Image (tube, rainbow, N blue to C red):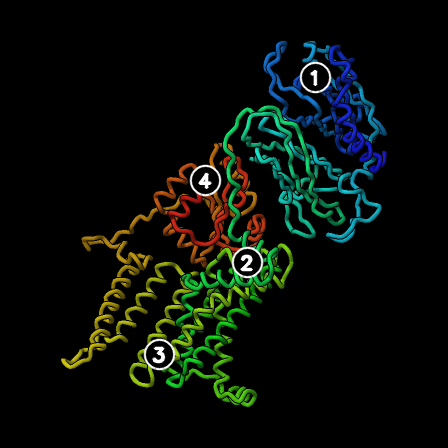
Amino acid sequence: MTRSDHMTRIFKVLVLLPLILAGPVAAQDKLLPVEEAFKYVVTDTGDAFEIDWAIYEHAYLYKSRLSFESGTEAIVLGEPELPKGLDHEDEFFGKQEIYRDFFFVRIPYTVSGSRPSSADLIIGSQGCDDNIGICYPPQTWTANVALTSVDAAAPKLNLGELGGSTQSEFPPADEVFTPELFAVDGNTVELGLRIVPGFYIYKDKLTVRVLNEDAQAGLWNLPPGTMKTDDYFGEMEVYLDSFLAELTVARATPEPINLELEFGYQGCAEGGLCYMPQTRIMTVELPAATSVGALESSPPVSEQAFLADVLVNKSIWNAIGLFFIAGLALALTPCVLPMIPILSGIIAGEGDSVTPMRGFTLALAYVLGMAIVYTAAGIAAAAAGMQLQAMFNQPWVLILFSGLFVFLALGMFGVFELQMPSSIQTRLSSISGNQKSGTMVGAFIMGGLSSLIVTACVAPVLIAALMVIAQTGDLVRGGTGLFAMSLGMGAPLLVVGAAQGKFLPKAGSWMIAVRNAFGFMMLGLAVWMLSRILPGQVTMLLSAVLIFMAGVFLGGLTTLSTDSSTPQKLGKGFGFLAIIYGVVLLLGALTGGSNPLKPLASVNVGGAASVAEAEHELPFKRIKTVDDLDRELAASAAVGKTAFLDFYADWCVSCKEMEAYTFTDEEVQSELANTVWLQADVTVNDEADQELLKRFGVFGPPTIIFFGKDGQRRQGYEVVGYMKATDFAEHLRKAFN
């Protein structure tokens, strides 16, 4: 039998099923012959027998009475794959599982020796007619099945270009992938696909939606697939064989209904390309519901998914406006605020000649540099499937730019004059006629370099743009979103530039003080960047030295005369406080402390001895690979626990904020009392890290994925970026409800 004949036969069976199930109406008052009450078709897939059963509407088969034996010596049967039956209280055999209407059985087999052209399959069964109340005697059926040749079982097909039309020699998608839907009870159906050997289905492309207003899809307990390296999507979980999976259905009313489902899927051929995504509307009659209740609202769509949808499906101007506003919201995050002293230092380097317009144009050059470089880096990273954060947070990069900030700070302190080489200034001025063009170019370059600071924070708006680029390949729309977001983040800097040009003190002692202040800000940025890779104790030690020296510059150790001005007295006061705080930080660092907000936590109150304070350790279980995750999820599901996976990195500022302020909250920990804490450290961003990130489409930490008691991902409940404890606790209640 050829593949075409094979699929045609199956297709005809499916088309004729409604006629078979209707049965002879006139025969309802008498017992039908057993061969008319129970009909079946057996086909071979190359490595398994597939049996389609069609049962008369008033009859049923006992699941426990089904048996299968090989009548051919060369064929060795495996374990039959039987669907779940209906619960039935039987007057003859008590509580039983039964099959009604139609169902599908798959029996894998192996061949011992040479492969015969046909094989006998011996089928045992017993059923009853509940209209008359009589059971048939046990039956033995023998089906002679023509075996598919091995070569025909797994053809290598060329399905044309992805998204293009299939070639005429290829079977239609309906013949390769056959959706199946069976009613189990009033609240459960079995939904799945029959897949022709040589083809496969992407697990993450499977979707299901209930179209009835009085019903709603619940959990779909999909079986595990097979990991496959796909030519188009990389490492993917796929189904190589036919499968059925239980889908729970929430019901608002108990009455029987015709359930209408929208089933979506996409598959490909081995050695070929992919079919277009398929959508099928399927209907099945559900009996009266065993449980009813108010239908839940749809799970929330994650913020990044919403933004990605706007970017793809809405007008480009709406997307630009939304992403610009989102960028404005990001401007006040800890990762964007450090840009203010960088820009201020550039403007302060102009001296007393700076004007509001000059400050604005310098800020504009700085913002454009940041936006262009950040957008280009984001496009490159997303297109290559890389973490944008990981690109800019390598230790050597952080050390290099920390050194740059130290260099700029020394320029602010007057150690040397910070300017471009005269030859370059002359050439630039001859082009534009602007004697300050060198500074404009410098501001642009500094803005581009400063873009790496933003990557320390992951926000949904950033993830949305990267999702669009990575998943659709639309560089224009994704890049437009990134650029609009960058301009939004930089817009407050334009105000800072113009205001600084207006209010910056002119030449004199005040100007020196301002430049010194910006110099210490630059040094603070260097320490802050190094904190991503240095131990907390070392970071605190550097902070102590920096704050102590700032206090000295403010005049904390300077003797004032009786006629000293008020600003001098204020400077000495603040300087003295800074010196004290610096000493406290130094003491804390030398005694093992690492938290600048609690510098003396490691020192005994009596001062006689110092002890390490036992810090509360979060109950995270570290995982590294996809296999580690699957194992832990299976273990949590086995004991009925929910789980969440936290993507973490040492250089991720928001990750440390989550650990310090959110995960330690009592309310949050109470909500997570029956939850397994899993954490993936992707600091290194090696192959295992990238595989784990790609599994969930995650572009960087902090990102949190939630899993139900069944071990399945709770789609739509992802958390990206920092979330306050109260908001996170409320989110947990929704995610695990």
Residue 630's mark? none
Instruction: Give the percent coordinates (x, y) of residue 35.
Output: 79, 16
Q: Residue at x 51, y 70 (%)?
A: 370
From the viewer's perspective, is residue 718 above or below residue 213?
below
Distance (Cα) linking label 4 and label 3: 55 Å
Instruction: State which tag comes first along the sequence, 4 or 2.
Output: 2
Q: Nearer the viewer, mark 3 or mark 2?
A: 3
In this rendering, position of residue 683 left or right of residue 273: left
From the viewer's perspective, is residue 208 above or below residue 533?
above
Using the image as rendered, state which of residue 318 and residue 36 is in the foreground. 318
Distance (Cα) linking label 3 and label 2: 41 Å
Q: Quadrant of residue 212?
A: top right
Q: Residue at x 23, y 77 (%)?
A: 567
Using the image as rendered, state which of residue 628 and residue 525 is in the foreground. 525
Read off the residue under disc 3.
503
Read off the residue under disc 4.
676
Three-letter amino acid code at disc 2?
Gln
* Label 1: few (<14), some (14–19) or many (≥20) C-alpha neighbours in 10 Å: some
Read off the residue under disc 1.
58
Instruction: Give the percent coordinates (x, y) of residue 26.
Output: 77, 15
